[in-house]
Amino acid sequence: MRLPNYAYIDLSTGTVKDYPISKELFTQYMGGKILGAKLLYDLLPAGTDPLAPESIVIINTGPANGTGAPSSSRFNMSFKNVLTGGIASANCGGRFGVMMKKAGYDGIILAGKAPILSAIEIVDGAISIRDASAYAGMDSEETQEQWVRHWGKLVIGPAGENLVRYACAVSGERVAGRCGAGAVLGAKNIKAIAAYGTQKAEVQNREKFDPYVKKWVKFLKSHPMTGKSLPLYGTAGLVSSANASGVLPTRNFQKGRFEHHRHISGETFAEQHLTRNSGCVSCPIRCERRVMVNGKEVKGAEFETVGLFGSNIENHDLAWINEINYHADLLGMDTISLAGTLAFAMELQEKGMADLGVSFGDKDNLLDVIEKIARREGIYGDLANGSKWLAEKYGGTEFAIHAKGLELAAYEPRNSVGMGLGYATSNRGGCHLNGGYLALLESIGVLTLDKHTPKGKPELCVMFQNLMEAVSAAGFCLFTTHTAVPAGLFKLGSMHRMTKFVSKALIGSRFLLRPLWWCLPWLLPVNLMHLIPHSKAYGLMTGQRMTAGKFLQIGERGFNIERMFNLREGLTAVDDALPTRLTDVPQEADVPESVVPLAAMLPRYYKVRGWDKNGVPKPRKLKQLGVR
Amino acid sequence: MAHTITESCIGCTLCQKVCPVFAVTGELKERHTVNAVRCVDCGVCGRICAKGAVLDSGGKATERVARKEWGKPYIDEALCSACLICVDACGLNCLKISRPTYQGDINACAYLADSKACVGCGICADACPLRCIRVRKAGTA
């Protein structure tokens, strides 16, 4: 078994040394965000300021990166969350991860702070640090142009340099967006990391791996979601169904439906704005939108950006959304947190609590405003600190839409209560992906689980949080999990009695899911191509005996180590919360149950997780997982 | 293992220009060297060298092959998933993904866009996870 090759880079002194990863650590924590969380837990002293020189940033890949497995270009950044103070991981589909692996490194650990603005180059197994002060103030595109085309790059824009708390890191046109990934690099004085190499990622069992990949790609291409819907409409295809179910956030999450939703729907996007679809390297799904902005073909907006820069600020100009999405990428800012913060500032202005130069329905100055946020100019410097900070300064905690400090993604949880539970319990804050993404089962997918009942939601939330944790850490894109919903149901449609039966059966499966986590990995000693194709691929590429049960348990271990990190940093059960607008005020006045019944779901969630009533993992659970 | 360049090298820079992984370095009229860590043993430098100054990974001298005899990638369009791995792997930027033929066309595949720049190194075929690229000479099976 090949063990991952990590380097420890002390930026203060400019020294580089190997950081050995033991076989035990690798088999238990796999790679990506899970191994990142474990390393961070071990290396980072408790209470360190995420932007201090003593802080640690880990940029690593998963075992699947570069192997040729479908949708396997995604690499990870782990660091202390700038917005929440807890754990952070940011996942990106750019070329940097694969190139870093080809250059001979599975991960790098950044410590200290470079004395001047610097760039790290990882070339053919050698790491060097060089002066990048000439690149100061450059946008993410211009910075990447400083290296030749075939290199993999990870850079920050002006927002990262100016420590905007939700700045992102950009690789190609993909971003490691959330939690302040750009700010932590900016705080270390790292403008860019570039990699080039030609070594091939090792696959232990090539004879079996190649046919399996072929079969998997065929399966992905034949599935209605990954083979048709995502390539045709991208993630923006969810706008129509989100609006129909009342989960399209509108006017800073005041409502869940937007009267002009047709103008920002995936169908309108495909008909009027799309030039072609594309994808990350190694991905057969190809959900990326390509659009024209100012005469140049660039990446189009994703569902979250469309929702938050569209309905959530009452704007229905899709061309403008694509333009601001492009500008946010150039400046290096996470569009979810940026748009969430702007919407909150707009409501503050509406209520007369603060005037930060933005208001609902007035989008004309926003391109200028985000430029000023990135440079922290005047009053706009306040907006660069995120919703939680704004609410602490100006008030309005009840409608500051964040969890633990991280702004919520574009799924209004009052009509998708499982998603609400996910937001509240997600380790990195208000994240839909770390939160289990139950919106897909409740409101925006083909399945129609009762979206208001708390029944079964804790169990399903735990299941999907663990699954997505493992899939992500292995280096795969989460969209490969879309195929877990049987293709046949898409043909029957969401109104068919069979689809309704499956939805009900999923809620009913809670009695089976509760004891599942105590019986892993022995309960699922198989690999299931149609449910979790990743486990077998992971086993073949690393040469381990892997089953779906073991794979899910690695995900559970990852979620628990992240939770342990959060608890150590002072994020407790009190922080597993949502703003009172979402938990106490019904979204629809005539539907009293359109609130997130968090108090009813959390105790059950903790129980299923094997945590005590204060949300602390019980020693028995940690022992079972081998965390302690 | 890697290819190496012997003392017979006259520094014509031809191998440097065609190397798809940028492993050959050297000044004009000076002996060139191959970066052993980077070399992928594709053999293109050996095929272009008129002086026979290139040794393969086994230390055997390589022979010059006329450029028109070099292979080109042929892509099985029905199998290709347009995953971009080959496009990304090609250091000479020869491959592209086809553009849609109508609004809403999601069928795409890789194709050889710059046949002139292609040196037939076979890196694309080696990288393709679906094994749908074959490098062969025109007119051969």
Image (cartoon, coloured by chain):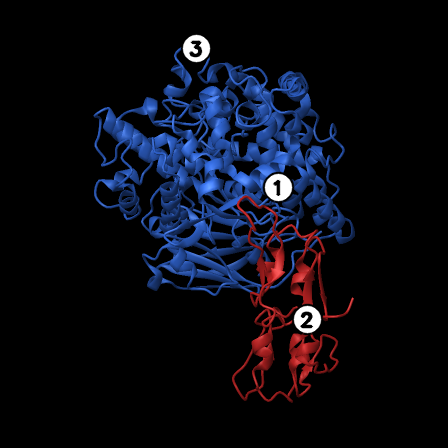
**Does any portion of residue A373 appear in the rendered image?**
yes
Q: Secondary structure at mark 2?
A: loop
Q: Earlier in the sequence, mark 1 or mark 3?
A: 1
The amino acid sitting under disc 1 is Tyr
Mark 1 lies on residue: A29
Q: Distance from label 1 to label 3 (Cα)?
A: 43 Å
- In this rendering, would A389 be left or right of B100? left
Q: Residue at x 38, y 37 (%)?
A: A337
Chain for disc number 2? B
Residue B37 appears at what percent x and percent y? 62, 69
Q: Distance from label 1 to label 2 (Cα)?
A: 35 Å
Colour chain B is painted in: red
Please tell me the numbered disc located at residue B41: 2
Q: Examine the image and state in which quarter residue A252 appears.
A: top left
Please tell me whether mark 3 or mark 2 is closer to you in this view.
3
Please tell me the numbered disc located at residue A490: none
Q: Which chain is blue?
A: A
Residue A534 appears at what percent x and percent y? 67, 40
Mark 3 lies on residue: A592
